[in-house]
Amino acid sequence: MATEGKNLSQYDKNTIPNAKDFRFGIVVSEWNDEITEGLFQGAFDAWIENGVQKENIVRWNVPGSFELIYGCKKMQESFEMLDAIVAVGNVIQGETKHFDFVCEGVTQGIKDLNIQTDIPVIFCVLTDNNIEQSRARSGGEHGNKGTEAAIAAIKMAQLRKDAKFYKG
Ligand SMILES: Nc1c(NC[C@H](O)[C@H](O)[C@H](O)CO)[nH]c(=O)[nH]c1=O
Ligand SMILES: CC(=O)[C@@H](O)COP(=O)(O)O
């Protein structure tokens, strides 16, 4: 089902692990900040609604989505106690193929971080044809992908915690 048929902000609170002791990082791209600030707010609000303490949320900004890779990597190195990190960006198609390379680069880079490092990095990057699609997915008619990403971060933090328990 595409986003068209669902609301990104809707989730079943009964399926969300207790998040009161989790610590989260969030790296926010400054490109298209009208959109990325909306995504950040969606994530922040979802964390607070699910019991995360404000002092357990660390935010860094980077210039553009391509820098999310390095920003998340350095945040992992700087804050080893984090339980998950959300990477927030918005890439909008322009006149050239640059969109393709930025989207592919940030996608592969964040994928690599999830393979090569221990702290989960959640992909909260909108890759849209136009600003209208971005607005619809950052608090508009299709909900907020930041909310979806924050919930994913809670679930992955719990999965990581459980894995450590079972590993002993
Ligand atoms: N066009 C968009 C960009 N481009 C900038 C790159 O992300 C990067 O900052 C630059 O190439 C320098 O390395 N970034 C976005 O996040 N969104 C765009 O639409
Ligand atoms: C994703 C981009 O970098 C893009 O918005 C830049 O626009 P253009 O392709 O017109 O240079």
Image (cartoon, rainbow, N blue to C red):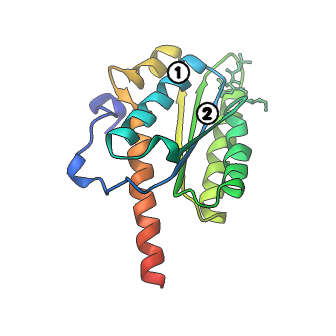
Depth order, front residue of 131/11: 11
Element marked by disc 1? helix
For this view, does 1 lie left or right of residue 14?
right
Amino acid under disc 1:
Ile
The image quadrant of residue 133 is: top left
Decide if residue 166 is in sight here: yes
The image quadrant of residue 28 is: top right
Residue 14 position in % (x across, y down): 20, 52
Amino acid under disc 2:
Val
Residue 132 position in % (x across, y down): 46, 14
Please give the label number shown on residue 110. none
For this view, does 9 lie left or right of residue 90?
left
> Mark 2, residues whose alpha carbon is within 10 Å: few (<14), some, or many (≥20)?
many
Spatial CA distance of label 2 from label 1 is: 10 Å
Task: Kindly identify which residue carries mark 1.
Answer: 35
User: Which residue is depicted at the point 41% across and 49% down?
Assistant: 152
For discs 2 and 1, the disc positioned in front in the rendered view: 2
Residue 47 position in % (x across, y down): 40, 42
For this view, does 155 lie left or right of residue 105?
left
Element marked by disc 2? strand
Decide if residue 129 is in sight here: no
Q: Is residue 55 above or below residue 120?
A: above
Task: Kindly identify which residue carries mark 2.
Answer: 28
User: Which residue is depicted at the point 32% across and 56% down?
Assistant: 18
Residue 53 position in % (x across, y down): 43, 45
Ligand 1 within 8 Å, label 2 CB: no
**Of the residues under marks 2 and 1, which one precedes in the sequence?**
2
**Ligand 2 placement by image quarter:** top right
**Quadrant of the snapshot with the N terminus:** top left
User: Which residue is depicted at the point 63% across and 50% down?
Assistant: 110
